[in-house]
Amino acid sequence: MRKYWCVIQSGYALYGVGKTKLSAVHDANEWLEEKTSVQEAGGGNPRINGSLCLLPCSEAVYDYIQNGGDSTSGWQENRGFVDIDKEKIICPKCGSDRCISDGSTIRKGGEIPAARCKDCGYRGPAGKFSS
Ligand SMILES: [Zn+2]
């Protein structure tokens, strides 16, 4: 499995993603006001809640963020690995978790966020992708 990397502020938000550690940190620094050194988590490093850390993440998280996903929800950290929050993004047609945010769609009452399944191609209101 190919590895992707992300920078998160533990418990709060995801700041950057990349295909390498360096590009994840670089991506995060575009969002942060000050250049920050990011410590790779694990290896016995103490983790302070609220501090930035570099963690491996799944391709789904990388796609989600690159496609304009919410940096504060839709993903979760689990024992040092960041993955899509499967409770939240599941395709209503085929049950796949390989779903991404995909712009917005017009429904009665206005514009709402949309999501798309990478497996079956179903696209619809993001709310439908909640389990
Ligand atoms: Zn699907």
Image: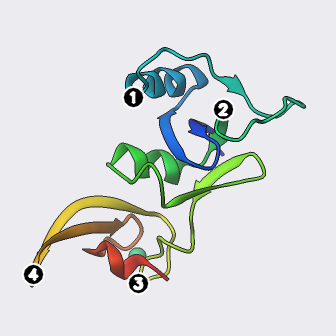
Residue at 32 percent of width and 67 percent of height: 116
Q: CA distance from mark 2 to mark 1?
A: 15 Å
Query: Which one is earlier in the sequence, the residue at label 3 or at label 2?
Result: 2
Q: Which residue is mark 3?
A: 92
Residue 80, horizontal then vertical, whole percent: 75, 45
Residue 126, horizontal then vertical, whole percent: 32, 72
Disc 3 marks a residue whose amino acid type is: Pro
Q: CA distance from mark 3 to mark 2?
A: 33 Å
Q: Cβ(mark 3) to ligand 1 < 8 Å?
A: yes
Question: Dot 3 surroundings within 10 Å: few (below 14), some, or many (20 or more)?
Answer: some
Disc 2 marks a residue whose amino acid type is: Cys
Query: Which element is circle 1 on?
Result: helix
Q: CA distance from mark 4 to mark 2?
A: 40 Å
Query: Which one is earlier in the sequence, the residue at label 1 or at label 3?
Result: 1
Question: Dot 4 surroundings within 10 Å: few (below 14), some, or many (20 or more)?
Answer: few
Query: Which element is circle 4 on?
Result: loop
Q: Which residue is mark 1?
A: 31
Query: Which one is earlier in the sequence, the residue at label 3 or at label 4?
Result: 3
Tell me if label 3 and label 4 are in contact, CB under 8 Å: no
Residue 67, horizontal then vertical, whole percent: 33, 48
Query: Which one is earlier in the sequence, the residue at label 1 or at label 4?
Result: 1
Disc 4 marks a residue whose amino acid type is: Gly
